[in-house]
Every structure is written in structure tokens, then in C-alpha cells.
């Protein structure tokens, strides 16, 4: 069953038409990846789903309910949570206090402090540390943990691997299975095409605000994905 359905979404910044007629679907316990070059409209698309961009038209349905006109805080309370690009932690607060920020939605579910520490044992060891002193990878784990503390049904991750070492990226993506098994669907924006294909059951490629390709990454040819990503013609 589809958890999230976006139909014909347009998003504007003033006169600028950033997202153009985008339709996508996320099923229960599925990971969906969104790829595309810088400026393609990936972040704008996720922000529109979470209610952050109000200049839009089209339908956004979550758990069968139209959320396209709902306030951002109510969308969060309904179970849609973003891990924002750049993490946006409270640097002067401890790891644990940052995680507790996620309790603000007051949603019940399996994700507690202990469950986050079981997922990322290193965070348990660092829980009293000021989060600004952590490495980039550890900060990303805090950002994901904080989002899980809201007990979402849908987790939207914007560029979670940006600037991180390959080993750390592997560690982060490995936890996606456990997150999905807890009943959470995931949408991830990923610049690394191979990583996106590996981590997801369905990918969407955005090019200048439009979906240029979509499908099961195991069935798509790498040539076609590259062409859709860069907007180049195929010569094979
Ligand atoms: N606040 C804004 N005001 C005006 N234009 C914006 C704003 N945010 C993004 N844009 C423009 O919208 C387009 C899509 O941006 P964005 O969604 O951030 O792309 P991506 O996440 O794929 O890199 C880009 O051309 C960008 O310059
Ligand atoms: Mg972006």
C-alpha cells in the first residue's frame, strides 16, 4: 500500500518554477532514493512534502489523507520527519539533549533513547558530549537518531552522506534495514548514484525540476541513469 503519494506537484520560489509536475509514490517499509544534479529540485521537493514551502500546487497524500495544505508542525505530528541537509544540530547541547528534541511530536512508537543507542552504540558512549565536538559521521547519526525519536512513519533524508568517508557512509546505510523493519519508510536524497541504487528499492531521477527517470534500480541500465542524471543523449 502506498504511504505517500505525490501527484503533479509544482513548487515555486516567486516566479521561479523549481519543481515541475512531479509525481512519486512511497510504499510501506520501502526505501526510495532521489538522485539528480545540484539545483535539480531535490531539497525543494522534500521540503514541499513536509509543508515548508507554501508556494505549491498539486496533491500530497499521506496515509490516505491530503496533507498538501497542512501546516508543517501538523505534518510532523502526522509522522513525516526530515533529516535536513547539513544536520542542523544544536551544537552547544549534548548528544542526548539533541536526541530528546525529537520527543516534541509526542508520537508513541518503538524509538526511544535506548533504541537509538542500540542502533548507534557509539552515540550511547558519547551521550554527554557537546554535539559540536563530534565528527561529521557521528553528528549525522545524531541527526538521524533525533528524527527517529519523533517515531515517524516516513523519514526524509537530505544528502545524508555528503562529505563523509565511505566507511561511515556504509555504517549509516546499513542501519536503514533496521529502521525499515521498525515500520518506517525512507526517502533519501543521494548524490552517489551507485549508493542510491544499492540502498533503495525504487529510484527517481530529477532533472531541472522534472522526473527524468524512475524505476527499480536493479532493472535500470547504468547508462540510462547517467543520461537521466546529466540530461545527455545516449550514444551507444
Ligand atoms: N529559497 C530559494 N529561493 C529561490 N530559489 C531557490 C531557493 N532554494 C532553492 N532555489 C532554487 O531552486 C532550484 C532547486 O534547488 P534545490 O531544491 O535546493 O536543488 P537540489 O536540492 O536538487 O540541489 C535551484 O535552482 C535553486 O537555486
Ligand atoms: Mg539539496
Image: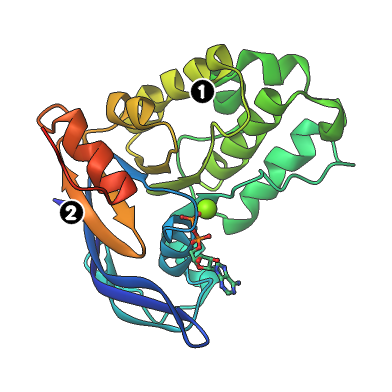
Question: Would residue 225 appear left or right of 177 to someone viewing this image?
Answer: left
Task: Please give the residue where the numbered disc 1 appears in the rendered image.
Answer: 172
Q: Residues within 10 Å of mark 1 (few under 14, many from 20)?
A: some
Let me know if residue 30 appears in the view.
Answer: no
Give the x, y percent position of residue 114: 61, 24
Give the x, y percent position of residue 186: 36, 41
The mark lying in front, picked from 1 and 2, is 1
Task: Please give the residue where the numbered disc 2 appears in the rendered image.
Answer: 2
Front in this rendered view, residue 175 or 127: 175
Give the x, y percent position of residue 100: 70, 43
Question: Would residue 195 appear left or right of 72 to someone viewing this image?
Answer: left
Helix, strand or loop for disc 1: helix
Outermost bottom residue: 15
Give the x, y percent position of residue 64: 21, 67
Q: Does the CB distance between marks 1 and 2 fall below 8 Å?
A: no
In this rendering, the answer to whether 94 lies above or below 39 is above
Residue lying at 17% horizontally and 38% vertically, measured from the top left = 224
Return the disc, 1 or 2, that comes first in the chain's sequence.
2
Residue lying at 78% horizontally and 40% vertically, measured from the top left = 97
Outermost front residue: 235
Front in this rendered view, residue 186 or 96: 186
Let me know if residue 224 appears in the view.
Answer: yes
Residue lying at 48% horizontally and 88% vertically, measured from the top left = 15
Amino acid at each position: 500500500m502506498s504511504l505517500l503519494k505525490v501527484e503533479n506537484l509544482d513548487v515555486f520560489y516567486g516566479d521561479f518554477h523549481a519543481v515541475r509536475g512531479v509525481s512519486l509514490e512511497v510504499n510501506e517499509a520501502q526505501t526510495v532514493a532521489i538522485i539528480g544534479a545540484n539545483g535539480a529540485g531535490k531539497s525543494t521537493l522534500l521540503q514541499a512534502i513536509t509543508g515548508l514551502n507554501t508556494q505549491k500546487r498539486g496533491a500530497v497524500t499521506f496515509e490516505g489523507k491530503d496533507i498538501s495544505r497542512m501546516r508543517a508542525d501538523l505534518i510532523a505530528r502526522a509522522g513525516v520527519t526530515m533529516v535536513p541537509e547539513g544536520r542542523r544540530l544544536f551544537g552547544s547541547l549534548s548528544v542526548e539533549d539533541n536526541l530528546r528534541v525529537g520527543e516534541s511530536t509526542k508520537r508513541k512508537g518503538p524509538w526511544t533513547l535506548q533504541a537509538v543507542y542500540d542502533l548507534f552504540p557509539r552515540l550511547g558512549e558519547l551521550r554527554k558530549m557537546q554535539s559540536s565536538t563530534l565528527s561529521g559521521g557521528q553528528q549525522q547519526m545524531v541527526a538521524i537518531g533525533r528524527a527517529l525519536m519523533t517515531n515517524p512513519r516516513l523519514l526524509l533524508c537530505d544528502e545524508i552522506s555528503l562529505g563523509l568517508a565511505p566507511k561511515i557512509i556504509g555504517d549509516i546505510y546499513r542501519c536503514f534495514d533496521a529502521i525499515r523493519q521498525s515500520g518506517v519508510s525512507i526517502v533519501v536524497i543521494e548524490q552517489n548514484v551507485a549508493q542510491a541504487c544499492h540502498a533503495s528499492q525504487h529510484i527517481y531521477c530529477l532533472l531541472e525540476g522534472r522526473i527524468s527517470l524512475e524505476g527499480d534500480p536493479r532493472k535500470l541500465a547504468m547508462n540510462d541513469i547517467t543520461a537521466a542524471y546529466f540530461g545527455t543523449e545516449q550514444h551507444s
